[in-house]
Image (spheres, helix red, strand yellow):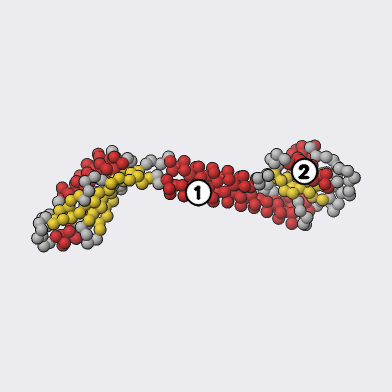
Amino acid sequence: MKVPRALVEGVLAAVAVGTLVLLAVSMRDGVSEGRLTLLATPSTPDSAQFGEVTSLAAPAVVQLVRSPSVLDVAAKAAGTTPDRLADAIAVELVPASGVARISVRADTAEHASWAVSAVAKAVIEADLLAPAARFRLVDDQPETARVSPDWRLATGLALTAAVIAGVAVAALRRLRGNNVRTALAAAGISHPVVVARDDDPGLAERLTALCVAAARPVKVLAVSPWLVERAEELARTLPDKASEPAEGTAVIAVAGKDRRSDLATALAVLPASSVLVAVVLA
């Protein structure tokens, strides 16, 4: 069974685009994230100002983690510069809980772990909540996770891009075919006509079968001047006529893929005795 060329081209385009998307993702630098959680606790069991101090002072953590002194220490741990690290630090304050979640992104899990530990240590040593409260670590060891590349997301994007590419190629192929049909309609040709590509390996056999069925002398018509040589070459591979010839000629038009107007004009002036049997897109 012969697989349609449009299907083959669509599948190839989908595979190529999907592969390129995955390749582009794989070439990106890996990013890991280290996380630590700080919890505000009262300095003394009967600290009456704990809640008020915590709600007022906790937001200062956001500014503290980006201070030059903290960034310098954390940048050395992360193997990067303070300016780049400033964009890689995030602080999440959980309302009415005294919880601050600090996360730092770096090129490796080890660097992310060291950097977030350095930042958390600096926040604790700053003692922002004194004297009513203080921050402490919920967990001694940072939680690390790889955040980029996200292969599940990349696979989804690759599949989506592949489907779009495949459909687009198939649509373009169909549109190209529709251009030929439009030209045939403009020339007043309503009977079925074979539309084939010049690079089709079985082109000569298909056209020979059509010529034999037509039982007429064969004329290969070059729609554009630059196609004359190809039309003559194609004509030499076809039989001049088969069995008892009928009136007129069997015409095979050789046209450019994007020259619909030329095709319509050439077909419109064919003699009434001529019958168009095929259009070859070169």
Circle 1 crowding by C-alpha within 10 Å: few under 14, some 14–19, many from 20: some
* Residue depicted at x 29% and y 43%: 112
Left or right, residue 75 beside residue 204: left
Residue type for callout 2: Leu
Local SS, label 2: helix
Instruction: Work out whether residue 65 can be spotted.
Output: no
Q: Quadrant of the C terminus?
A: top right
The residue positioned farthest toward the right in the image shown:
244
Residue 53 percent across, percent down from the top left: 15, 60
* Residue depicted at x 74% and y 54%: 184
Residue 114 percent across, percent down from the top left: 25, 41
For residue 93, the mark is none
Circle 2 crowding by C-alpha within 10 Å: few under 14, some 14–19, many from 20: many
Residue 200 percent across, percent down from the top left: 69, 41
Residue type for callout 1: Leu
Local SS, label 1: helix
Q: Nearer the viewer, residue 259 or 131?
A: 131
For residue 207, the mark is 2
Residue carrying label 1: 159
Left or right, residue 116 beside residue 271: left
As measured in the structure, the alpha-carbon distance from the residue carrying label 2 to the one carrying label 1 is 39 Å
Left or right, residue 179 beside residue 169: right
Foreground: disc 2 or disc 1: 1
The residue positioned farthest toward the front in the image shown:
1
Hey, which quadrant is residue 105 in on the image?
top left
